[in-house]
Image (cartoon, rainbow, N blue to C red):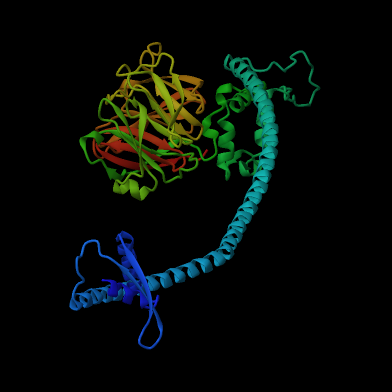
Amino acid sequence: MRFFCARCCSFGPEMPAVQLLLLACLVWDVGARTAQLRKANDQSGRCQYTFSVASPNESSCPEQSQAMSVIHNLQRDSSTQRLDLEATKARLSSLESLLHQLTLDQAARPQETQEGLQRELGTLRRERDQLETQTRELETAYSNLLRDKSVLEEEKKRLRQENENLARRLESSSQEVARLRRGQCPQTRDTARAVPPGSREVSTWNLDTLAFQELKSELTEVPASRILKESPSGYLRSGEGDTGLSHLLALPSFRMIIVCVWKDYGLSGASFSFLNLPGCGELVWVGEPLTLRTAETITGKYGVWMRDPKPTYPYTQETTWRIDTVGTDVRQVFEYDLISQFMQGYPSKVHILPRPLESTGAVVYSGSLYFQGAESRTVIRYELNTETVKAEKEIPGAGYHGQFPYSWGGYTDIDLAVDEAGLWVIYSTDEAKGAIVLSKLNPENLELEQTWETNIRKQSVANAFIICGTLYTVSSYTSADATVNFAYDTGTGISKTLTIPFKNRYKYSSMIDYNPLEKKLFAWDNLNMVTYDIKLSKM
């Protein structure tokens, strides 16, 4: 053991295994009780130190073979440690590479961060510019709105003032109409005034009244050359521009002014007639019926169909309406934009009325449907474009729901009609004892403007219609050879009998109306919708 330790101590310090062995020797030496250090020259004369330690456990030194085995073991351990050292060096190299890469990344990062910040800054600047532009646009729009508000306020003031003026005019007109209805025309004549011999008395009818001013304003809008032409005999006759005079004669104040002026000249007020309207005359002929459409089901046994003689946007002269009136809750109104759609049975729209209608007396005039409410004497104005009720009016004393119908029945107590003069209602009352009563209606508010009582019993005729202010009746709703048998002129108050042939081709005519725009009669004959051409005498 001592020799082994001494040999170990003589190895160079570079070998780890030898160093470990030396440490082991020292440990043993520390643990030994006795130690000896000898110094002597070797065979070559070189000084050699020998350090000896007694083994605490072994009584004798191992054999040489055992010592070599230990040495081999130590050498193997040394090789293993060397391999571990190489692996450690490789890991250190990898760590150095990673550290170098991290150092480079850290150096490059500030530049990339700066570029990102620059891009973000550019985006923010663009957004700021956009916000500034939007702000300027909003300020401009706000300025425009303020300006428009100022204009609208001025317009509102103007309209309010105009409304007040119209209200005053309406009140004045109402008073004037009431007075004229009582037959009290303006007393402008001075009967005591002497008229010079040989001179013609001139009317001094007051031209400053509101009614005359209204007439004057209307005349300034309609050239006289388009309304009336003078015949070689000197009498006025109808010509082009019929709608102008029709519009004037539709004004109650105009008609009453004419009557009063005629009275002022000593003429009879009854001499004025709607027959003098341009294009008007007495009915002299009714043609053969032309069938346009046949109803598909029994609900179309009878009904009413019409076109607007005074169409308003969005409707045209072709727009057609149809109502099947069989049933207890009639509310559907079929609308057809084109005549071809009507003939093929393809409605473009279906209106549902807010309350049911009764009978076949409905009409369309100036964009509104006028009809009688079910089981009432109320006439209703329903604006088709807005689908809203604009006016309702009870016809005073009018019979309804079977009190005074036409001879065919169908609750036709109240029948509405349209002609060149406007909107009318045909009915009867207890006071008239079943005779036909005829009233001119204001199409806006349904107020009664004027009323006539005829001597024609309503239940003795099958139907009635109005042309140029004259009421015409039909004798039968089933006879193939019926006639237009009576006429009542509202201008003269005179009725007369007629024998104008009228064909009920399908033998159940439940509705006959006149369309002043097309100059035709529209009828509903036993599921069939037909038209009749007519001829009027020249006035």
> Where is residue 10 shown, x and y percent of the image?
36, 77
At horizontal 43% and vertical 18% (from top left) the residue drawn is 395
Residue pushed farthest bottom?
Answer: 44
Query: Number of labelled discs?
Result: 0
Q: Is residue 82 visible?
A: no
**Residue 273 x/y as whole percent:** 53, 29
Residue at far top of view: 431
Q: Nearer the viewer, residue 286 or 220?
A: 220
Tell me where residue 466 sits by quadrant.
top left
Q: Residue at x 21, y 35 (%)?
A: 298
**Front one among 461 and 351:** 351
Q: Is residue 369 above or below residue 433?
A: below
Quadrant of the rendering where the N terminus is positioned: bottom left
Q: State which quadrant residue 114 falls in.
A: bottom right
Q: In the rendered view, tell whether residue 498 sits above or below residue 107.
A: above
Question: Viewer-proximal residue, 500 or 319?
Answer: 319
* Residue in the image at 69% along x and 37% along y: 146
Q: Is residue 66 left or right of residue 194?
A: left
Q: Position of residue 475 (x, y in %)?
A: 31, 29
Q: Is residue 67 visible?
A: yes
Q: What residue occupies the far right of the structure in this picture?
A: 196
Percent from the top left, x then y, of residue 347?
A: 33, 44
* For residue 338, side relative to residue 524 (left or right): right
Left or right: where 106 falls relative to 387 = right
